[in-house]
Image (spheres, rainbow, N blue to C red):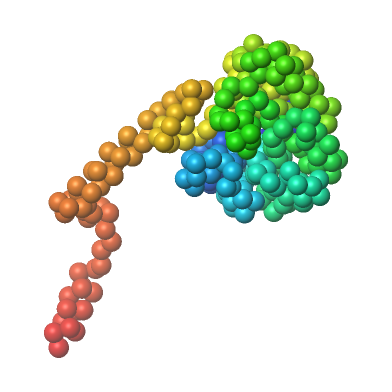
Amino acid sequence: MQITIDHLRNMKKAGEKIPTITAYDYTSAKLIDQIGIPLILVGDTLGQVVLGYGSTLPVTMQDMVHHTKAVSRGSTNALIVADMPFMSYQITVEDALWNAGILVKEAGAHAVKLEGGISVSETVKRIVSTGIPVMGHIGLTPQSVNQLSGYKVQGKTLDSAKALVEDAKALEQSGVFSIVLECVPAELAKLITDTVSVPTISIGSGKDCDGQVQVFHDMLGLFQDFKPKHAKKYSNLAENIENALKSYVSEVKQGIFPDDSHSYQIKKAVLEELRSDLKS
C-alpha cells in the first residue's frame, strides 16, 4: 500500500512511531521498502556517504535527481522525500518552485525537504500551494554548517530554544506535513513535538519525537569516515565486505575461483569438432 502524508498524520495521532531511513540507490530502496518502512529520505547526505564530499554543500540538483530516480524505481510503498540541495531554494521562490517540481515530476519524489524555519516559511507556503508536500528541517541544519560554526547541538540556550519553537510553529502554519528535528536537546524536541500537530522526525533529538531517521550507511556500519553520536550501528557491513573481498582475492590468486559451478560449458562434441577444424 502506498504510504501518503495522511498515513503519517494518522500515525502521530495514534501514537505510532514513524521509522525513517535514508536511501540513495535502487538496491537499498528495495530492501527498505520490502520490510515496510513507511518513509524514505533521499538525503543530501549522499554527498558524504556516497560521493565522498566533506559536507552536503557541493551536492547539486543533478545529483539529487539522479539518486531520487534510482530510489523511486526501487520503492513501491514508501513515501519518498527528496532533499532540496544547497542553493536550490534560497535564491528566489521561483527557483524553489521550479526545483521542487523537478524532484517530483522528473525524479519521482512524493515530497521535498528543505532546511530552515521562519526564514523559509513563505517559500514553503508557495511550494505547498502548488500541490507538492514539504517536510521542514530545523535544529542543526547541515547546509548552514559554516554559519553555525560546525555541527553543533542547537537550542541549548533560552533564546535559541524559543527560536526553534517559533520556527516549528511557522513551518506548521506554512503547511509542512512533517518536521525533522536534528541535534535538538531531547527535552526541547519533546516540547516541540507536543506543540505542533504535524509529525516530528528525530535525528539526534531523543525518543519522544513521532519518528526517527537514520542514515543507511551509518546504521549498517558502511560509512567509516566518522560516526555521529546519534548514529547507532546495527551491523558492521564494512568489516563483512572487507573479509569477502579478501576471500575473493585469495581465491583468484590460488585458482580456486571460478570453479565449474561458476563457469559455462560447451558440449564436448562441439569442442572436439572445433579443435579438429583448428588443426586442419
| Image quadrant in which you'd find residue 234 | top left
Q: Quadrant of the C terminus?
A: bottom left
**Residue 126 point in image, percent of width and height:** 84, 41
**At 62% across and 30% down in the image, what residue appears?**
148
**Residue 34 point in image, percent of width and height:** 54, 36
| Image quadrant in which you'd find residue 30 | top right
**Count of residue discs:** 0
**Residue 178 point in image, percent of width and height:** 72, 28
Q: Nearer the viewer, residue 251 or 133?
A: 133
**At 27% across and 54% down in the image, what residue appears?**
262
Q: Is residue 36 above or below residue 263?
A: above
Report whether 72 appears left or right of 54.
right
**At 77% across and 15% down in the image, what residue appears?**
195
| Image quadrant in which you'd find residue 164 | top right
**At 20% across and 73% down in the image, what residue appears?**
271
Q: Is residue 47 above or below residue 16?
A: below
Q: Nearer the viewer, residue 269 or 90?
A: 90
**Residue 114 point in image, percent of width and height:** 70, 37
Report whether 234 appears left or right of 96.
left
| Residue 34 seen in the figure | no
Report whether 145 appears left or right of 197.
left
Q: Nearer the viewer, residue 119 or 209?
A: 119
Q: Quadrant of the N terminus?
A: top right
| Residue 112 seen in the figure | yes
Q: Looking at this view, name the residue that lies furthest to the bottom.
A: 280
